[in-house]
């Protein structure tokens, strides 16, 4: 039976990016509540590292109400909440704002966000009788404001809520906005008292474990100032602007997209950017009836249509929408000329692209950390605009002793993720929903086949050469050591006492920034990592003077230096508080240096396959355990020592059956499939590495999978498995 898709839908988010809008407002803390199922840590996306803790196991990976997508968390109203760290960060004695997206149906008193002591003092955002409310207390438990929405919102729909206060007692300075509309405006009668830093900020309950919230909460952000009207409007617009369907404007060309891990060799563990291409009508036959509707520089350009906006593709089958791709528009190519087709070619990149573009140096040295925790640090260090929509990481299986000591003055996020993934032989990619996923090295070996192709493919490509066969695997990894005491000079400028001094001039009242890259004091050409950086001491670590040669009046007491220490650099923010210009004549930072001592003895695995010598050498930048490295070498050998069992790609037509269509619509990178193909004689399981679709005439589909080999499950044991069955999930030597 031949089946066809109902239609393909192409949509664009013609508006402000939520991630950009929130990040640009510099929240004190930002809890997106979009962690993977089973997570215990609620990550702080503000960049301030104030992570919270999930208590009671709320339901995670609930669909978010945001246009961009992602996830939210649902709380049961009796025992589930989030407790947040760095208590004093939320002590607001003046202006502040609280923002959240949530839905509920109850009329009971329920807390959304609170920092209230039993006195009470502090503040809270809550709901009662179906209305949205806020409250703040001064010392002695006196309420200083209590805005209450006029309307009720216990309708089970998601609502964007923002409370702002400018910190004054002027008339009508407390504003409660619901879905972009002013829901209540009141006057503050005093200043809220702090809770003394002894009471945590809570999400979904108060501090006593009462007034539990039943419903879904998403995107909780707290600010130490009043958000402006422009910011308020931008935040609601980013939340509320719906996806715009541009399907009616598709020109009659193939729509193509691809994403996943390109290649299936022993070092192919990380996805590339992924791409999509389609064409839009740019003449008056489009839905806007305007020439230049999809030309960014044209007076008739569609509102919100520009570079960098999100676009996604959904395939409708049997009345159900399946999202198959999401990314950002980065190529807009209108065809010019009155005799041309008057179309615009759209080229989009998948959300892995953000990792390729983002250059990071704001990472701290990680010691004895799993690859999962380190991947989280990379993700959070990226600019919000470059991040995928969420992350879903398997549990880390390795404890890596030192991470990020090799990034120098900066490294691309994609390079760091690649090093982490390769060092543990996991897999990293962005899925069809825009979520960054990490599979640890055990996940695939314990998975089950999702679909069987029994001579139902249009083409099936097996190796025609030995290019991907290796019977001699050599793994290299570095040796490192760290200083015992935090007394090493990690960075310094040559001061006035040296042969070639270097001084820095700072104008009166000016603030400058300096990035100091760490180097080995015994070999200035060797960059090193650093940790346990010491606070700067006047004269010892920094000096300032009215003259560049340090012979004038000392001015170190008149400058202020704020340091932010990372894995390989320190950011110095230096302010001259003097009435005149001064020269910085000494600047250094001390700490523990981390040094690369070259490579450890390599580990090898070999076999006696009848192909002659086929060797491969792989470097694992963050691995250090020779036993794990040996296991990895054995694993790679088992996977690549024989040409039998390998395949490069497969193309099939989902239309051939309902089961095959549903398999294609639900397939994801990392899925295990079974293939039986009579002409090549291949029978066995393979993993999907890359997914490519071509959609013709908006109905006819060709799907191509890039494929990676499996190994026999009884080759290794995973002794850590909770239940152990030899030959299925018990794989010796690959822990």
Image (cartoon, rainbow, N blue to C red):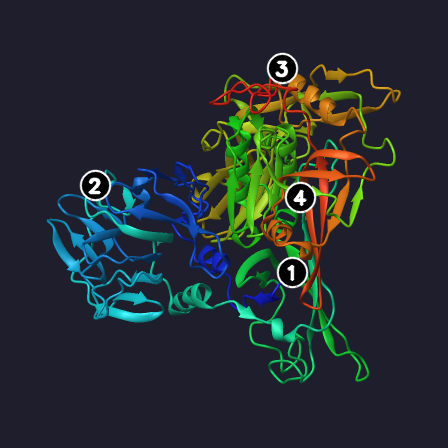
Q: Is residue 582 above or below residue 238?
A: above
Q: Which of the marked residues, 3 or 1, is nearer the chain's N terminus?
A: 1
Quadrant of the snapshot with the N terminus: bottom right
The image's mark for residue 627 is: 3
527 left or right, relative to 511 = right
Q: Quadrant of residue 296?
A: bottom right
Query: Cβ–Cβ below 8 Å for labels 4 and 2?
Result: no
Q: Which residue is mark 2?
A: 209
Q: Which of the marked residues, 3 or 4, is nearer the chain's N terminus?
A: 4
Report helix, strand or loop for mark 3: helix
| Disc 2 from disc 3: Cα separation | 47 Å
353 and 511: which one is in front?
353
Frontmost of labels 3 and 1 is 1
x, y (%) of residue 121?
17, 48
597 and 349: which one is in front?
349
Residue drawn 64% across the image and 28% down it: 423
Query: Cβ–Cβ below 8 Å for labels 1 and 2?
Result: no
Q: Which of the marked residues, 4 or 1, is nearer the chain's N terminus?
A: 1
Q: Which residue is mark 1?
A: 3
Quadrant of the snapshot with the C terminus: top right
Within 10 Å of disc 4 (Cα), the crowding (few <14, some 14-19, many 20+) is many
Q: Quadrant of residue 147?
A: bottom left
Q: Which of the marked residues, 4 or 2, is nearer the chain's N terminus?
A: 2
x, y (%) of residue 418?
65, 37
Residue drawn 58% across the image and 35% down it: 439
x, y (%) of residue 442?
58, 28
Q: Which residue is mark 4?
A: 271
497 and 157: which one is in front?
157
Frontmost of labels 4 and 1 is 1
Q: Residue furthest front?
A: 1
């Amino acid at each position: 039976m031949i089946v066809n898709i109902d239609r393909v839908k192409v949509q664009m988010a013609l508006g402000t990016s939520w991630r950009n809008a929130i990040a640009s407002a510099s929240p004190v803390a930002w809890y997106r509540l979009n962690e993977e199922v089973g997570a215990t840590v609620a990550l702080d996306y503000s960049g301030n590292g104030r992570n919270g803790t999930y208590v009671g196991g709320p339901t995670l990976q609930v669909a978010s109400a945001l246009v961009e997508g992602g996830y939210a968390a649902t709380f049961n109203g009796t025992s589930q909440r989030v407790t947040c760290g760095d208590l004093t960060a939320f002590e607001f004695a003046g202006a502040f704002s609280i923002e959240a997206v949530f839905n509920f149906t109850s009329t009971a008193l329920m807390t959304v966000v609170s920092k209230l002591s039993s006195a009470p003092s502090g503040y809270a955002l809550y709901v009662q009788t179906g209305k949205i409310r806020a409250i703040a207390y001064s010392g002695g438990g006196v309420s200083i404001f209590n805005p209450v929405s006029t309307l009720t919102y216990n309708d089970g729909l998601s609502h964007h809520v923002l409370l702002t206060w400018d910190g004054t007692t002027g008339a009508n300075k407390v504003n409660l906005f619901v879905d972009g509309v002013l829901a209540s405006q009141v006057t503050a009668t005093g200043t809220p008292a702090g809770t003394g830093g002894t009471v945590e900020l809570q999400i979904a309950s108060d501090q006593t474990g009462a007034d539990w919230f039943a419903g879904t909460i998403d995107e909780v952000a707290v600010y130490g100032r009043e958000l402006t009207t422009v910011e308020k409007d931008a935040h609601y617009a980013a939340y509320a602007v719906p996806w715009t369907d541009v399907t009616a404007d598709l020109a009659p060309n193939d729509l193509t997209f691809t994403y996943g891990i390109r290649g299936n060799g022993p070092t192919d563990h990380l996805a590339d950017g992924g791409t999509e291409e389609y064409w839009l009508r740019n003449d008056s036959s489009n839905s806007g009836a305007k020439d230049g509707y999809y030309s960014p520089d044209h007076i008739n350009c569609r509102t919100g249509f520009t570079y960098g906006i999100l676009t996604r593709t959904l395939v409708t089958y049997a009345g159900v929408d399946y999202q198959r791709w999401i990314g950002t528009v980065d190529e807009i190519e209108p065809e010019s000329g009155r005799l041309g087709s008057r179309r615009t070619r759209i080229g989009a990149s998948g959300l892995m692209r953000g990792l390729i573009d983002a250059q990071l140096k704001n990472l701290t040295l990680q010691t004895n950390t799993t690859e999962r925790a380190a991947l989280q640090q990379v993700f959070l260090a990226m600019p919000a605009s470059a991040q995928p929509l969420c992350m879903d990481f398997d549990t880390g299986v390795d404890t890596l002793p030192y991470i990020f000591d090799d990034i120098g003055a900066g490294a691309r996020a994609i390079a760091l993720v690649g090093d982490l993934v390769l060092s543990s032989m996991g897999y990293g990619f962005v899925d069809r929903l825009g979520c960054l996923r990490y599979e640890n090295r055990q996940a695939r070996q314990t998975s089950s086949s999702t679909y069987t192709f029994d001579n139902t493919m249009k083409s099936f490509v097996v190796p025609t050469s030995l290019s991907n066969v290796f019977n001699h695997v050599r793994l290299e990894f570095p040796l490192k050591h760290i200083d015992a005491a935090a007394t090493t000079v990690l960075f310094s400028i040559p001061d006035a006492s040296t042969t070639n001094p270097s001084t820095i001039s700072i104008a009166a009242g000016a603030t400058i920034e300096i990035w100091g890259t760490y180097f080995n004091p015994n070999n200035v050409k060797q960059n090193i990592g650093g940790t346990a950086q010491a606070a700067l001491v006047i004269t010892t670590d920094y000096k300032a003077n009215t003259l560049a040669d340090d012979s004038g009046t000392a001015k170190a007491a008149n400058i202020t230096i704020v340091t932010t220490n990372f894995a390989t650099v320190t950011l110095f923010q230096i302010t001259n508080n003097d009435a005149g210009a001064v020269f910085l004549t000494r600047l250094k930072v001390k700490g523990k240096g981390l040094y690369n001592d070259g490579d450890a003895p390599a580990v090898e695995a070999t076999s006696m396959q009848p192909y002659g010598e086929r060797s491969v050498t792989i470097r694992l930048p963050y691995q250090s355990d020779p036993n794990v490295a040996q296991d990895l070498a054995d694993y790679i050998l088992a996977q690549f020592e024989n040409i039998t069992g390998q395949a490069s790609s497969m193309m099939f037509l989902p239309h051939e059956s309902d089961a095959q269509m549903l398999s294609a619509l639900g397939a994801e990178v990392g899925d295990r499939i079974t293939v039986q193909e009579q002409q090549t004689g291949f029978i066995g399981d393979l993993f999907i590495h890359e997914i490519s679709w071509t959609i013709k005439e908006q109905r006819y589909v060709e799907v191509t999978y890039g494929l990676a080999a499996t190994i026999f499950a009884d080759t290794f044991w995973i002794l850590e498995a909770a239940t152990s069955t030899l030959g299925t999930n018990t794989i010796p030597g690959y822990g």
